[in-house]
Amino acid sequence: MTGTKYVFDDIIVGGGLAGCLMAFELISNGRKVLLIDEGQAHSSSAVAAGIINPITGKKYIKSWNIDLFLPQAVKTYREIEKLLGITILYEKNIVRSLPDISAENQWESRKLDENYTNFIKENADISDFQNEVNISGNLAEIRQAYRIDILTFITSLCRYLEEKGGFLCHTFDVNLLKIEDKQIGYLHFSASNIIFCEGHKGIANPLFPDPGFALTRGEATIINIPESRISKMIKDEIFLVPFGNDLFWVGGGYENVSYPEEITSNHKKIVKKVISSLVKVPFETVEVKSAVRPTTKSRRPLVKQHEMYPHVYYFNGLGTKGSSIGPYIAHQLAQHILSENTTFEIVW
């Protein structure tokens, strides 16, 4: 882009899951959006599996506000697929191990609770691939679980915006930002609003000091299991998620393993040993990824409006449940921007 001035309705800083969901909501309502992103391949969004898991934790409770978030998430991802001509939403049950009597009793109590009926399959079934995995104890199976292909989504949306002149590959410099009463200026661009969706880098944003981050480092391994029949997500000590074409995402269970920024061959051996405890057929390690996750102290997303500048927003900290939470927040924030109300308050 060259020239003296390009006018947009909204500028979004950050092309991860939060930023791309925000961009989608706004362009779906006819807004002209500029998305600024530096193209980090190792962002937490690019590393994430995109799991929507309605029942979580050792006590098998419903994920926070899942009854509110899930319908909006499914609706949003289907609309994204239609707009971009891609497939990113895959419904895949989750099979979990029940390692002891206490876990079995907890699960049985959930099966009797009508609030959980829609999310529980009466009898877990791994008959198609039981020879490929080693799952301890009895099993539970969760329905209405999904995998979101986040990488395909953010790549496709950025390309879509680029074709329309609405994408800038650039490292944002807040010192170049000009905030006026009703206008935002940056380089040779102007807009009515700016939304910061910078992920863990948002911790250094001077407009929103001390946002409440508790940064962690997440890791994922992509493996290949030749001619695998595993069609469901598996949760034991680690998470095994089918990606298609015999590729699987593996995460969790080894975050306590110390690893450097650059993954070493020794670390790959440690990870492979952990994965071998679940996968009992030959597999090949394709890639080991790591990224800083913008988790928060409260374990809740950070959605803020600047106190002095009501047209400056902050949307970060989606964490591990971002695939389910993100669409709802993006929709709420977009509706607020469209309404042109002065103050913003998200409704949970």
Image (cartoon, helix red, strand yellow):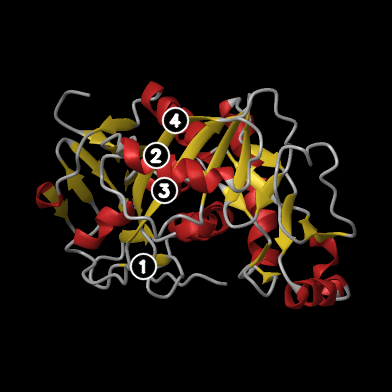
The three-letter code of the residue at mark 4 reads Thr
**The residue tagged with tag 4: helix, strand or loop?**
helix
**Considering only order in the chain, which callout, 2 or 4, is on the residue closer to the N terminus?**
4
- Horizontal and vertical percent for residue 342? 38, 69
* Residue drawn 59% across the image and 50% down it: 239
What residue sits right under mark 3 in the picture?
219
Residue labelled with disc 1: 304
- Image quarter where the C terminus lies is bottom right
Instruction: Name the kind of residue labelled 3 in the image.
Output: Glu
Nearer-N-terminus badge (3/1): 3
- Distance from disc 4 to disc 1, alpha carbons, whole Å, reads 26 Å
**Does residue 35 appear in this view?**
no
Could you tell me how far apart the alpha carbons at marks 4 and 2 are, in whole angstroms?
27 Å
Residue at 17% in and 23% down: 2
Circles 4 and 3: CB atoms closer than 8 Å: no
Q: Secondary structure at mark 3?
A: strand
